[in-house]
Image (spheres, rainbow, N blue to C red):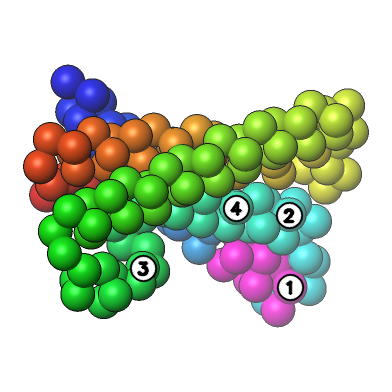
Amino acid sequence: MYTRLCAAIARLCLRLGVAGLVLLIIAVLYQVIGRYVFNDTPTWAESSAVLLVLYVTMLGMAVGVRDAGHIGLESFLALAPEGLRLKMEVVIHALVLVFGLLMAWNCGLLAESVAGYKIPTLGVSEAFKYAPPAVAGVLVAMFSVEHIIALIRGEEVVPSWH
C-alpha cells in the first residue's frame, strides 16, 4: 500500500513537473517576445520563470531519488558480498532519508522566516521560494523509507514512469 502511495505521488510530481516546464517555456517565450518584438519586457516573466525552475527541479529531484535516477557509486557495492551490499544500501538510503528530513526542516524554517515578505514582481510571499525544497525533502524521506522497506523485503522499487 505504501509503495502504491509513493508511486502515485511520484507520478503526480512528474505530471506537475511537465506542466511546470510548459509554463516555464510560455513565460520565457512571453518575456523574449515582449523584449524583442514589443520593446516592453514584462516584469513578472523572469521571476515566475525562476520560481518555476525551483518547483520543476525539486519535484524532479525527489522523483529521481525514488526511481534511483540519482548519481550513485554502485560499482563498489557490486563487488561486495551480498550481505554487506544489502547493509550498505540500507545505510545509503538512511543517509538520504536524513538529508531529506534536514532539507525539509530547514527550508520550512526559511519559508516561515520570510513569509511576511513579498516577491516584488509577483506579489506573492517569499516563502514560495523555499516551499519546493521543503516539500521535496519530505518526498525524499518518504521515498527513502520505501527503498529501505523494499531492500529488507528483497524487492525492487518499480520506477514511476512504468
Tag 1's secondary structure? Answer: helix
N-terminal-most mark, 1 or 4: 1
First to last magenta residue range: 26-36
N-terminal-most mark, 4 or 3: 4
Q: Please tell me the numbered disc located at residue 47.
A: 2
Q: Please name which of the two marks, 1 or 2, marks the residue nearer to the observer.
A: 2
Q: Is residue 162 left or right of residue 112?
A: left
Query: Gap in Å between the C-alphas at discs 1 and 2?
Result: 15 Å
Mark 4: few/some/many CA within 10 Å (<14, 14-19, 20+): some
Residue identifier under label 4: 54
Residue in the image at 19% along x and 75% along y: 79
N-terminal-most mark, 4 or 2: 2
Please say if 95 is above or below 80: above
Query: Gap in Å between the C-alphas at discs 3 and 1?
Result: 42 Å
N-terminal-most mark, 3 or 1: 1
Type of amino acid under label 1: Arg
Q: As rendered, which of 105 and 12 lies closer to the eye?
A: 105
Q: As rendered, which of 1 and 44 lies closer to the eye?
A: 1
Residue in the image at 10% along x and 42% along y: 154
Q: Main secondary structure of the magenta part?
A: helix
N-terminal-most mark, 1 or 2: 1
Tag 4's secondary structure? Answer: helix
Q: Please tell me the numbered disc located at residue 72.
A: 3
Tag 3's secondary structure? Answer: loop
